[in-house]
Image (tube, rainbow, N blue to C red):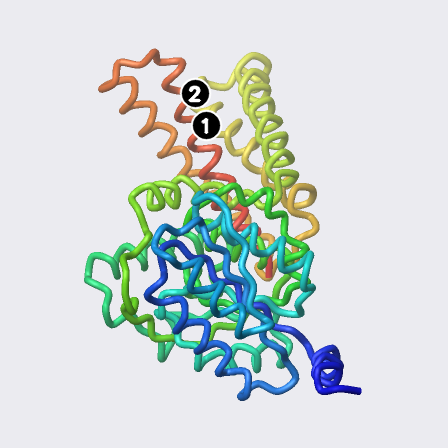
Amino acid sequence: MDLTDKYESENAMQAEACFILPTYNEQANIQGTIEAIFEQQTRVSGYTFRILVVDDNSSDGTQETVNNLIEQHDFLHMITGNKVGLGDAYKRGFHHALTMFKPDVIFQMDSDGQHDPTLIPDFIHQIQQGFSLVVGSRFVKGGSTPEFSLRRRVISKLGNFLVRYVGGVRHIKDCTSGYRCIAASYIEKCNLGFLSTRGYSFQSSLICELVAQGAKSKEIPIVFTQRNAGESKLSIKDQVEFLLNIPKLGFHSHKDFIKYSIVGFSGVLINLGGYVFLTRYLGMAQEVAPLLSIEASLLSNFWFNNFWTFKRRSIRTGVLSRLLQFHLVAGMSGIINYALFFLTYKYLMINDIFANLLGIGAAAIVNYLINSNWTWKRQ
């Protein structure tokens, strides 16, 4: 057996970690990042490192630099394509890695030097301890963003707050971090087609999808420093896409939402039917009957959602606690419904029926998102 055969035989017995590095005009950074990753190979036993650069047709010589390095490293690869966005690049990278290399774990990393490669052994150690999603977190003890301005720090905290509570991943402090190690088997489970975002909001969508698939998560602290060279690729378009994507994070299960909507419609019928019965057959005053008919519809909605819509969820809180939470959410939704109706009808001069429909629609979405991720939050 010659040395090449021996080397390949030894590698075949090891697990593989594939690092996916999306790039666009990163010539000044990419070589240093690649070499720093490969340097960590000696600190990690049992794993072979492979790097896949996903370049969006850079115009600054990034591809030439990577091609030169490929001649020196057998486990360095590159695929190219048109510049669409970070999310699109990662989707292409995941597909190529899973199809061609079949790695055991996949790393997501920035190629601009902002992610410290010396932490790679810590990520893999957590994978070996049984975690399937390890996140480099700026917001746990020991993590920091020393170069962030106050404005960027506030925006980042607010964005993470929205993702955590709307997406049902409250146990993860940093949902937008781009430094992650993921068990490849969980990426294979993800419905990447559902993650329609093309830009940076892909990161938050992916973490919600991984948790929904049952990935066991762990955060380790990182210090997020300034990029070594070049300019940030985060655009206004990416920020707008991030905000527009927030509501979608709560809809991991369209089946749950369809059931919830059916229950809501049945509640409308019970509300209306109860009102007619109380006023027309029992002679109850019109001022009092709505209070009872509304409560009847709320109790009906809660019952059906608890024992049908969210029946399969493992939930810590008791039935009475969930009933109270459900009533609180209903009250909040009613305020949103009326506020939107009043503003659009009074100040935008929209037809009152259409204004009411807008209010009902917005309230229904908020109602579902909060109840799905709070009242019936998965354990």
Name which quarter of the figure residue 340 lies in: top left
The residue at the point 44 percent across, 82 percent down is 118
Q: Which residue is mark 1?
A: 361
> Is residue 338 in view?
yes
Q: Residues within 10 Å of mark 2 (few under 14, many from 20)?
A: some
> Is residue 374 in view?
no
In x, y percent, where is residue 368?
51, 40
- What's the residue type where badge 1 is placed? Gly
- What's the residue type where badge 2 is placed? Leu
In this picture, residue 194 sits left or right of residue 345: right
In x, y percent, where is residue 331?
41, 38
Name which quarter of the figure residue 25 lies in: bottom left
Considering depth in this image, is 363 or 32 the residue closer to the camera? 32
Q: Residues within 10 Å of mark 1 (few under 14, many from 20)?
A: few
Considering depth in this image, is 128 or 51 the residue closer to the camera? 51
User: Total of numbered circles in the picture?
Assistant: 2
The residue at the point 46 percent across, 66 percent down is 109
Considering depth in this image, is 157 or 365 the residue closer to the camera? 157
In x, y percent, where is residue 56?
45, 50
Mark 2 and mark 1 in contact (Cβ < 8 Å)? yes
Element class at badge 1: helix
What's the mark number on residue 330? none
In x, y percent, where is residue 272?
55, 20
Q: Which residue is mark 2?
A: 357
Element class at badge 2: helix
| CA–CA distance in space, label 1 to label 2 | 6 Å
